Every structure is written in structure tokens, then in C-alpha cells.
Image (cartoon, rainbow, N blue to C red):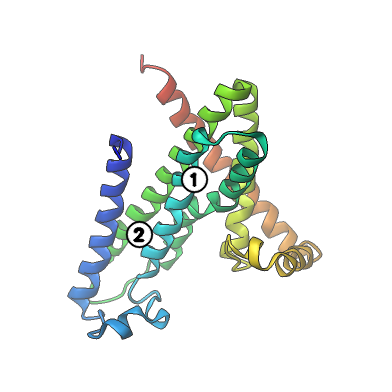
Amino acid sequence: MRINPLTILLLGQTALCGAMVLFRNLYSGSLPAGFAQFASLENWGTQTFLFLGWNLLLAWVPYWLAGVLPAVRGVLPGAGLLLLWLLFFPNAPYLITDLIHLRARGPIPLWFDALMLFSAAWTGLLLGYCSLLRVGEALRQRWGARVEWGFSMVALLLCGFGVYLGRFLRWNSWDALVQPAGLLKSIIRAMGDSHSLVLSLSVTILFGALLGLGYFTIYFLAKSKLS
């Protein structure tokens, strides 16, 4: 199967992030000697930054789902795939929030960790934007530009709320499938607390606005030539 240049570039950026994480662990001596110890989830903490690999893998899910969407025939299968894409879409820009882990950790210089975290965040953001561009194009071809724009704005706002659920309430995308009742109870409990309500609205609106401005900037750059 032929891979398009965009996918190759995104794979290259992901590989660069992985190489930086690997180099960091080799240089600092944090890489466990045994594979079984290395594979243990206990070692995927902020000292090793191995969690970036998992987060990048999740960021690829909406990109691949968006690539499958144009080939789906039928309203119900298409709607189901679109809902699944919406569920995993926040995993891509979620990598921006991993910047909170930036702090001095010798013997690695701070600038290296800053570049590594930014590289992962940038890769996740691009995966999210490219994913939404793919979905938007599929919707525009079937139902027109209004549906494309309306869906894009709703998706970006829901993405902001999804980031809140992941970063602050610590829920994952698949929890909506395996623990829907628990997720719903957690959301209702958070909305009933004034502090949590203000935080959720702030994160949703600010994150949605940030992602929206960035997305539509890229959208118009992709659709038009620079003057």
C-alpha cells in the first residue's frame, strides 16, 4: 500500500520524538537493563518520559481513522466511525498538556527536555489538525462546506472538553466504551462542584479557541496561496 508524503513526514516526526526519548534514557542511565523491567508500566513515568511514546501512539489513532472514513459506505457505518474518531480525537492535541512535566532533571539539560516535549506536542497537534482536515474533506464532499465547518467547530470544542477529562479527571478515550457509567458519574460529579465546573469550562473554551484559531489558520493556508 502506497503511503502519501504527509504520512511519511508525520512518521518521521514521531520517529524523531522516539529517538530523543531513547537517547535521553541511554544518556541518563535511566533505561532499565532487562526488557521485562523496561516493559513494566511502573517505568513509564516522568523520569523516563516513556509515556510520550504511548501518547504519540494514541495520537495516531484519529489520523488513521480519518483515513479510513472516505472508504466507508453507508450512513450508519460512517456515523459510527465518525463517533469513534471523535472519541479518540482529543488524544492528539492532548500532548500539548505534557509540557507541564518540563523541569530541570539532571544530567539532561533543560533545553533538551524542552525540545523533546515541544517536539511531541507539535507532532500531536499536527496529527490532530491533519486528522480533522481529512474528516472535514470527507464531510464536505458528501454534505457540503457548511456541514464541514459546523462539524469542525463542534469537534474542536469537544476536543477541549476531552483534554479536560484526560488531564484533570484522568479518563481515557476507551473508558467511554468500557466504563461509560463511571465516566458519566465522574462528569456529573465534576459539574456539580463549582470549582470543577469553572475549571472545565475554562479549559474547554480556552483549549477549543486555541485549537480553533490554529486549525482554521492551517485550513486557509491549505486552501489558498499566500499573497
* Residue corresponding to mark 1: 65
Residue 132 visible at all = yes
Looking at the rendered structure, the secondary structure element under dot 1 is helix
* Residue corresponding to mark 2: 117
Near mark 1 (Cα within 10 A), the count class, few <14, some 14-19 or many ≥20, is many
Q: Residue at x 45, y 39 (%)?
A: 67
Near mark 2 (Cα within 10 A), the count class, few <14, some 14-19 or many ≥20, is many
Residue farthest along the right direction in this orientation? 192
x and y percentages locating residue 112 in the rendered image: 25, 62
The answer to whether 147 is drawn above or below residue 17 in the figure is above
Q: Quadrant of residue 222?
A: top left
Looking at the rendered structure, the secondary structure element under dot 2 is helix
In the image, taking residue 71 as reference, residue 42 lies left or right, namely left
Q: Quadrant of residue 32?
A: bottom left
Q: Amino acid at mark 2?
A: Leu
x and y percentages locating residue 136 in the rendered image: 54, 31
In the image, taking residue 4 as reference, residue 167 lies left or right, namely right
Which label sits in the foreground, 2 or 1? 1
